[in-house]
Image (spheres, rainbow, N blue to C red):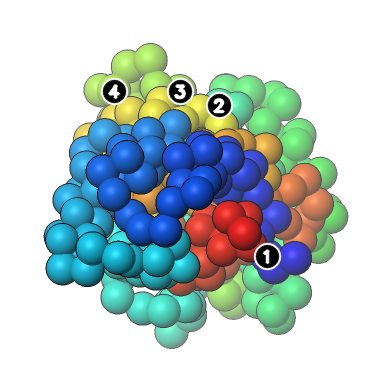
Amino acid sequence: MGIFDKGVKKTNQNFFQRLSRAIVGRSRVDENVLDAIEEALISSDMGVETTLKIIDNLEDRVEKDKYMSMDELVDILRDEIGKLLGVDGAETPEPFDFSKKPYVVMVVGVNGVGKTTTIGKLAANLRAKGKKVVIGAADTFRAAAVDQLAVWADRAGVEIVRQEMGSDPAAVAFDTVKSAVARDADVVLIDTAGRLHNRIDLMNELTKIRNVMRKVIPDAPHEVLLVLDATTGQNAYQQAQEFSKATDVTALAITKLDGSAKGGVVVGIVDRMRIPVKFIGIGEGIDDLKVFDRREFASSLFSKDDIQ
């Protein structure tokens, strides 16, 4: 089983169970098959807009070749999904530009999506690659968040900068970046509060964090990584919209893909927001955060084995 097969297994099964019912006994793609594909894509939470875009392209291809086989159909689906996910045009992009040192990543997302866990796993991933990492615990409104992050920092073997509960998040971010520069760190990961009840408050807080970090590193943050939970389906898209209004989101990390039949939401969000996915979470283990590969993801999403 490949890396991404595990992450999209439930989505894959859900899709092909629906599709198989429509194609049993058929030798070619017709209107009924296209309708079944449309229903299956929407059921995977790809979103109506993105689904219709895929169906329109499929209809054009089918019009040219009335006797397209099921194997050809799956290949086309893979190709279409791969194209939609290709925001940055790279096949397997290096997630961070390590020529910038330290490379500052501000991590945002609502509570419960796996933001703190993602930071811990990412720190471990980078540490395993020989990078010196410093974590900033700037979610000072939840004791559990800071304590959990400290546990992950210890597991990953990286430094964490923290202050008392209720401290100014921007002050924590400032101290973290200063510490990272002094220690010649390669990467800084800044956790932020996961509150979305008031967009203005969120925007002000994230703007303040960004501004104080720029007093130390003028172009910080180099990345704003939004963490989304795949199991929430279209709600994840709504969160992406809200955070994009509050700050300049530059990349996505999609968690809990292994537990969701809604993996299509990854495609829908990227298609509509034009923000690249850089990481996916496919399990609870410290090694279960993987660098995203759009073609491998598309291949796993539409595995031919499931329609034999």
Check disc 3 and report the residue beneath it: 195
Which amino acid is tagged 3? Answer: Arg
Which amino acid is tagged 4? Answer: Arg
Residue 15 seen: no
Which amino acid is tagged 2? Answer: Asn
Residue 260 placement, left or right of 64? right
Distance from Cα at disc 1 to Cα at disc 4: 36 Å
The numbered disc on residue 3 is: 1
**Front-most of residues 238 and 100:** 238
Residue 59 placement, left or right of 161? left
Distance from Cα at disc 2 to Cα at disc 4: 15 Å
Distance from Cα at disc 2 to Cα at disc 1: 26 Å
Distance from Cα at disc 3 to Cα at disc 2: 7 Å
Q: Position of residue 137 (x, y in %)?
A: 61, 42
Q: Are marks 3 and 2 in contact (CB under 8 Å)?
A: yes
The mark nearer the N terminus, 2 or 4, is 2
The numbered disc on residue 265 is: none
Check disc 4 and report the residue beneath it: 199
Distance from Cα at disc 4 to Cα at disc 3: 9 Å
